[in-house]
Amino acid sequence: MDHFSRVKEEFKKQAETLSAAPAFTDSAVLERIHAAVRPTGEMKLLDLGCGPGIVTASLAPSVREVVAYDLTPEMLEKARRRCEKAALKNVRFELGRAEELPFEKESFDCVVTRLTVHHFTDPPRVMNEVVRVTRRNGRVVVADFLSSENEEDGALHNALETLRDPTHVRALSADELRELLRESGLRITSRVTWERERDFDEWMGITNAPERAKPLYTVMAALARAGIQAGIHLHLDGNKLAFKHDYLLLAAEK
């Protein structure tokens, strides 16, 4: 199975759970994205990898138009229903790959993408497409969780994420994410960081793949007992396994 087929398969399973997951619906995070986008009533915005439309529905009331774009039909259907429930009439839904955006050059005033970069097999290619479809002096907002700047910790963290969800390719470090935008020709104008405590059961439950839970818990618990934190403060509290994700949101101009 190729990567794109695997993404469709996995996110078809995750469409329901991800739609309601606190890690995705957190209003404080949506407020950070809103502040970075700086929406106006004339703005045409692309939500790249929109998933179930959480960011789309949050921004749509403040802009002229949002194009909600995703690879997975079930995610787009969730986004459509979310927007219909909110009586949003200015959202258009498009299916396709981030690596080959079906939009003309400089089509958007702003492109926003959240929690997608770690799923891309070729992040520079995606960012080049993002820059292509963003107008001159337009804005790009990228948010994702990070891996450690320490190479060994980062590799271990990414391995654990891949065992949980095989669509995970690689979370970047903060330096790598900043460099990705700069190498695409963007000028970074602001950055916001935060962290979120993750409970193993909550994190694992989003995948709707219970067959992976027990072996992954066994591996991660053994690491925690050995004092190996994988750059994510992996730890046990009794039998409760937890860790933290560090996040970075970058706003940039073309």
Image: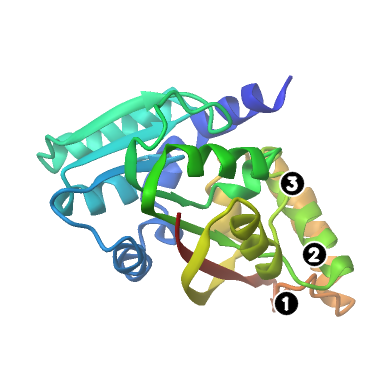
Query: Could you classify mark 2 by the number of other residues whose Cα lies within 10 Å: few (under 14), some (14-19), or many (20 or more)?
Result: many
Real-space Cα separation, disc 2 to disc 1, in angstroms: 16 Å
| Badge 1 vs badge 3, beta-carbon distance below 8 Å | no
Q: Residue at x 44, y 32 (%)?
A: 70
Report the mark closest to the observer, 2 or 1: 2
Relative to 216, residue 86 above or below: above
The answer to whether 82 is drawn above or below residue 181 in the figure is above
Task: Report which quarter residue 158 is drawn in.
Answer: bottom right
Q: Nearer the viewer, mark 2 or mark 3?
A: 2
Where disc 1 sits, the SS reads: strand
Quadrant containing the N terminus is top right
Q: Amino acid at mark 1?
A: His
In this rendering, position of residue 29 left or right of residue 116: left
Indicate the position of residue 167 as horizontal and vertical percent values.
67, 38
Pointer 2 residue: 154
Q: Which residue is mark 1?
A: 235
User: Dot 3: few (<14), some (14–19), or many (≥20) neighbours within 10 Å?
Assistant: some
Which residue type does callout 2 highlight?
Gly
Give me the C-alpha separation between circle 1 and circle 3.
19 Å
| Residue 132, percent from left and from top | 48, 38
Residue at image coords 61%, 60%: 182
> What residue is disc 3 on?
162
**Kind of residue sitting beneath label 3:** Thr
Say which quarter of the image contains residue 155: bottom right
Q: How is the image coloured?
A: rainbow
| Residue 106 image point, x, y percent | 38, 37
Q: Mark 1 against mark 3, which lies toward the viewer? A: 3
How far apart are the alpha carbons under marks 2 and 3? 12 Å
